[in-house]
Image (cartoon, rainbow, N blue to C red):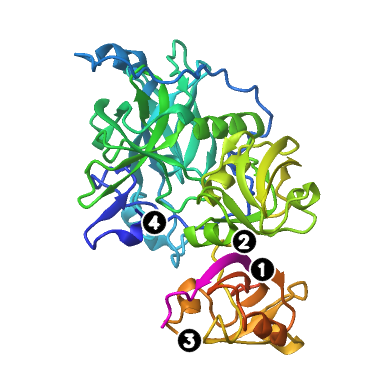
Amino acid sequence: MNSAELSPRQVVTRPQIDSRWLRWPVLALATAALFLGALPDLRAKGDSDKATPPNLTVDTKAPNREGSLPRSFAPVVQKVSASVVQVFTSTRPKPMPGFNQEDPFNFPFGNPAPRRGMSPRQNGAGSGVIVSKEGYLLTNNHVVEGADDVRIKLADGRELPAKVIGRDDKTDVAVLKVNADNLSAATFADSDRIEVGDVVLAVGNPFGIGQTVTMGIISATSRATFGLPYEDFIQTDAAINPGNSGGALIDSDGRLIGINTAIISRSGGNQGIGFAIPANIARDVLEALVTDGKVTRGYLGVLPQDVTPAIARKLGLKDNGGALLAEVTDRSPAEKAGLASGDVVTEFNGKPIRDARHLRLEVARVKPGESANVRIRREDDAKVIKVTVRERPDEQELSKSGNSKDADEGTLNGVGVTDLNAQNRRENRIPERVKGVLVTEVEEDSPAWTAGLRTGDVILELNKQAVTSADETVRLTENPKDKTTLLKVYTPAAAKTGGTTRFLVVDESKAQ
């Protein structure tokens, strides 16, 4: 589910707590579909030296799924309880816009705090997980974002200042470091091996009351709920409440499988729908921030889209799995390797690809300079192409939302098209490289409208045949083999950030 599907009283919340309230609403995260790349992320001020990689313990065995539930999970909790900490943040008062801090009336009667024109001090609390004996911790970006001071409280009662090593707002992961002896580090599990129904425990600091453990199961995997560029959440019904943000989600063997990060709730408290960042994603971010000071993700240079049932039928695919490449960027790693628009990626680096989002996640995990094997379906052939992934060349990102366009009669009824010329290119921000026909009209409630075709789109291909004139496009719709039309469409952007390309199927077989 996404926030647009919630009833009016439902609230999507990040389970972090502020001293003034006992619940926080979810952060307003901007949805940005990526062009399979990423930008550098934040690191601690003044920390420019490349550090030694963290010393992590990783156990890749699958969870134990044999036997019945134990009478007690105490031995499991004891393995990890010392690794889970409370995180306290403080943000110092800052000048508010419009106030002159030189004005002596900002300091009435010599009392410097609180001062007129200064925002109040903000205090917050969350959770964190120690993952190395050198003192590295994982928590959520939204727990420490904007904080001036960060402190942690260990399970043994020690309170220590913590340094923010780096933050990655694209996954909501942050890395902290403390200097202390006798730290207990959690063991990472392979979060790719978890399954729906596995027993899990959530350990954290709900409502700031101290370490608390709750039990549940994995309710779902691979959730995309909050609009983060890279999200692949584990869903659980283990109770997660405000303040649990950054805490540990562990399996029945006491291994870390996720970092608790968000809930969906009508009340602001637990209602059985909580989400955790998979441990594998958190570990990748941790290692990158510690060693490089930023997260550099792989860039392929393709614009993928999901394979809908209609597209699968039109392309002759057996199922809806994989990611359809709507566009391949010029001079990109994908183009140099031989990938082309219309290819369906079914496997990347040995992992089956479910959809476009899954492809983005897997490409992002490849370090620039490394090679990956991409299994594709092209026409009736299956082949493997080796691609050398590189770092994203700039920060421009393309939106995945495109629309479609097409012809006039026979099929695509209710659609009007015209040739592209200098004037309508300029009016619609259509670059010279885009070759096709401009959609001038789409009747509402027509099959083309339902499929997503809109005025201003450019039809590039009709049933896999490139079109360059309105007459040619009309001719291709006059005597169709069937009443479904596969379109390749370019949609101009509202600003000068570049448009998007995608495939869609217009089905007129049931039209009256």
Q: Which residue is mark 3?
A: 443
- Asked if the residue at tag 1 contacts the one at tag 2, i.e. Cβ–Cβ closer than 8 Å, the answer is yes
Residue at disc 2, secondary structure: loop
Q: Is residue 250 above or below residue 102?
A: above
Q: How far, Cα to Cα, is label 2 from label 3?
A: 28 Å
Q: How far, Cα to Cα, is label 1 from label 4?
A: 41 Å
Q: Which mark is residue 398?
A: 2
Closer-to-camera residue (458/51): 458
Residue at disc 4, secondary structure: loop
- What amino acid is labelled 4 in the image? Met
Q: Which mark is residue 498?
A: 1
Mark nearest the camera among 1 and 4 is 1
Q: Quadrant of residue 109?
A: bottom left
Q: Which residue is mark 4?
A: 118
Q: Is residue 262 left or right of residue 480?
A: left
Q: Which mark is residue 427?
A: none
Q: Quadrant of residue 123?
A: top left
- Asked if the residue at tag 3 contacts the one at tag 2, i.e. Cβ–Cβ closer than 8 Å, the answer is no
The residues colored magenta run 497-512
